[in-house]
Image (cartoon, rainbow, N blue to C red):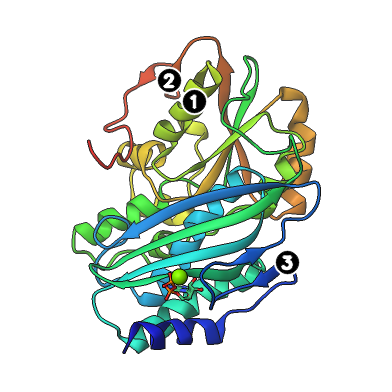
Amino acid sequence: MSEFDLIERIRARVASREDVILGIGDDAALLQVPAGRQLVVATDTLNVGVHFPAGTAAADIGWKALAVNLSDLAAMAAEPAWCTLSLSLPDGDPAWLEAFLDGFLALAAEHRVALVGGDTTRGPLSIGVTVHGFVAPGRALRRDGARVGDDIWVTGTLGDAAAALQQWRAGEGGDAALRLRLDRPVPRLAAGQALAAVAHAGIDISDGLIADLGHLARSSGVRAEVDLEALPASSALTAAFEAPSRHGLQATGGDDYELCFIAPTAALEAIERIARATATPITWIGRIVAGEGVRVFDADGAEWQPPRHGYEHFA
Ligand code: ADP
Ligand code: MG
């Protein structure tokens, strides 16, 4: 199938929005940013064998390619609006493309995100997505706002995606609930936007809690102290992994796309309200102190050393 047939298949399926003046079909898209709002832009690439196991279903790849990008907008407290899609495909298989679009466009429809352009080339399977969203000036949730005395919170549960990857690598059948967390991450958009009213800083957990919290601590010029026993675990994770290895997955496993945010202690009740209103589990996991880096303490108050720190491409 030719490049133009593939693009036509994509164009035929996308939904539009009023603020898309010109979408797929010209040399560039023409978009109207609402008056008085800031444009928030994030981009993330998914490569076969690095970001998803070879053999992952096309619909799951489509979903995840958009989800990991929307997670970055969630972490900035932005409302998503548009995206572009850069596809590198080993062959022009229309069935693969349609299945990919099933996953991609299902998530796009859930959040009213319009696909407004992209690029289609032949090469090793790789998917690049750029997302655009809006935020009121001064309301973005940045990494540099944590203050000494603040609390550290996290949405959802940690370690499921890394657990699924470990099971897949071991060649086991693997737990379906864990595998769903790896293949179909759910971006925490509603929680992110609501938390902007109370939080001082935030980040999404793509490379593992310790690694990502480390980025936030460095940006803010503070130290993060985390209680290992406080880290939330799903029942699927608890059933499949005993404490020592489970803790490693929760503290350092990547690909969960939960939000980690920092808020003043006075925000406790507001956070509980947001958790209920957005149906998002939110758990206290530690505190911000003076210093630098991330320290994790076990139930006895002894410092805990992670088996590894998190995912880094060029390590
Ligand atoms: P050009 O040669 O001017 O760069 P292309 O032939 O690459 O244009 O693309 C034609 C139109 O199709 C453009 O509007 C482009 O944004 C869109 N497009 C190409 N590939 C994709 C894709 N994978 N997803 C969405 N839109 C795409
Ligand atoms: Mg052109």
Front position among marks 3 and 2: 3
Task: Tell me if residue 196 comes above or below residue 287 in the rendering.
Answer: below
Q: Which mark is residue 183?
A: none
Precedes in sequence: disc 1 or disc 3: 3
Q: Residues within 10 Å of mark 3 (few under 14, many from 20)?
A: some
As drawn, the residue found furthest toward the top would be: 290
**Residue to which mark 1 is pinned:** 226
Give the image quarter of residue 30. bottom right
Task: Check disc 1 and give the amino acid type.
Answer: Val
Q: Position of residue 69 (x, y in %)?
A: 50, 55
Disc 2 Cβ-to-ligand 1 distance below 8 Å: no
User: Please, what secondary structure does the residue beneath circle 3 have?
Assistant: loop
Which residue carries the number 3 mark?
19
Residue 3 in the image: x percent, y percent? 35, 82
Residue 155 visible in image: yes
* Disc 1 secondary structure class: strand
Q: Position of residue 101 (x, y in %)?
A: 47, 78
In the rendered structure, the answer to whether residue 199 lies left or right of residue 227 reads: right
Task: Answer whether labels 1 and 3 touch (C-beta < 8 Å).
Answer: no
2 and 1 marks in contact (CB < 8 Å): yes
What amino acid is at disc 3? Asp
The mark that comes first in sequence, 3 or 2, is 3
Marks 2/1: CA distance? 6 Å
